[in-house]
Image: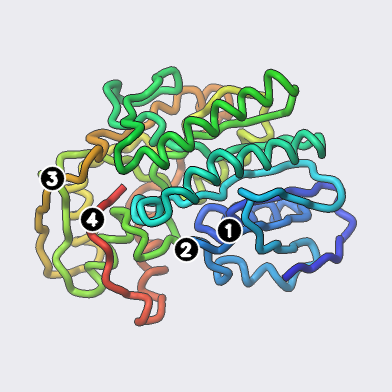
Amino acid sequence: MANNTNTGNSKRVLVTGAAGFLGSHLCDRFIKEGYYVIGMDNLITGDLKNIEHLFKLDNFEFYHHDVSKFIHVTGELDYILHFASPASPIDYLKIPIQTLKVGSLGTHNCLGLAKAKNARILVASTSEVYGDPLVHPQNEDYWGNVNPIGPRGVYDEAKRFQEAITMAYHTFHNVQTRIIRIFNTYGPRMRLNDGRALPAFIGQALRGEDLTVFGDGSQTRSFCYVDDLVEGIYRLLMSDYVSPVNIGNPDEISLKDFAEEIIKLTGTTQKITYKPLPVDDPRQRQPDITRAREILKWEPTVSRAEGLKITYEYFKSLPQEELVKLPKEFYK
């Protein structure tokens, strides 16, 4: 499923995980910037609907491929953005081995491709490398508090290894690398059934169900709208900065208060119910974005109220059959 007609644009970018939530928005951004975009995805968690609007373009092509296997891309590449990975607890608990493989073998393959093509590569790490943090807010110098054999370990340790091998390729092979640590992000194209708090709450509200909060709801998250995140990613890729950079919104909120915001936004008459806290669920999550502000001149500009309104309208527009019953074991 590839459109191989190049428009003559000399800048070519590969986006892995292109059919996913973040990957699809990155494809849109680089198309808008005039790049020739190659999307790659094995569609385990991605959906072609997220990028089908790009198939008609001459400067976009798509490869159905698992990056955990050898990657071959013809022609030159200027940039690689490695965003292939399950990203919610529901996903990586169902496919733990694939999660570990895409973070290790997949990253190794992408770095090898970057070395062969002399391309700059940005890898998508995560706030989960901080685990259940003992430092608050979390800055990039904090090494984290991660349980390597807990239920989240397959994702957390895959991303920590990803950072380590990325830095090794930079220091040993002089590959141009960038590492972004992404905090909770939301917006259109999120999957309603991926188990994360925002789509879970909105999905429950749309179905007239009570909103499920785990623990006492005092655990916190910080939600960044996808457009702000994409801007931060773009600035980091174009920067000369090699060490990890947090990109997220430092506007912290408890999950109980967040559930109440969703109830108010959606106008549901349902109440909040409480269930036991999952194993290793982070109690606090708030990025210290000092580094992003100083180096990238970046900070979020979309308020949570504004972003939630856009996201809610997107979810309301989905076909009724997509309002499936959500798995409730984990929220991220």
Task: For the residues labelled 4 and 2, say whether their Cβ atoms are less than 8 Å apart.
Answer: no
Q: CA distance from mark 3 to mark 4?
A: 12 Å
Tell me the amino acid under the disc marked 1: Ser
The answer to the question of whether label 1 and label 4 lie on touching residues, with beta carbons closer than 8 A, is no
Q: Which residue is mark 1?
A: 24
Query: Whole-percent x and y of residue 180?
Result: 53, 34
Distance from the alpha carbon under mark 1 to that under mark 4: 27 Å
**Residue 326 position by quadrant:** bottom left
Residue of label 3 = 215
Mark 3 belongs to which amino acid? Gly
Name the N-terminal-most of marks 3 and 4: 3
Which residue is at 53% across, 58% downward?
A: 20
Image spot of residue 21 (x, y percent): 50, 57
Residue 297, given in percent of the width and then of the height, sits at: 56, 29
Can you tell which quarter of the image residue 215 is in? top left
Residue that label 2 marks: 189
Q: Secondary structure at mark 1?
A: helix
Q: Amino acid at mark 4?
A: Glu
Whether pointer 2 and pointer 1 mark residues with C-beta atoms closer than 8 Å, the reply is yes
Q: Compared to 88, does 324 lie above or below?
A: below
- Depth check, mark 1 against mark 3: the one in front is 3
Q: Earlier in the sequence, mark 1 or mark 3?
A: 1
Quadrant containing the N terminus in the rendered view: bottom right
Of discs 2 and 3, which sits in the foreground? 3
Q: Earlier in the sequence, mark 2 or mark 1?
A: 1
Say whether residue 258 is left or right of residue 118.
left
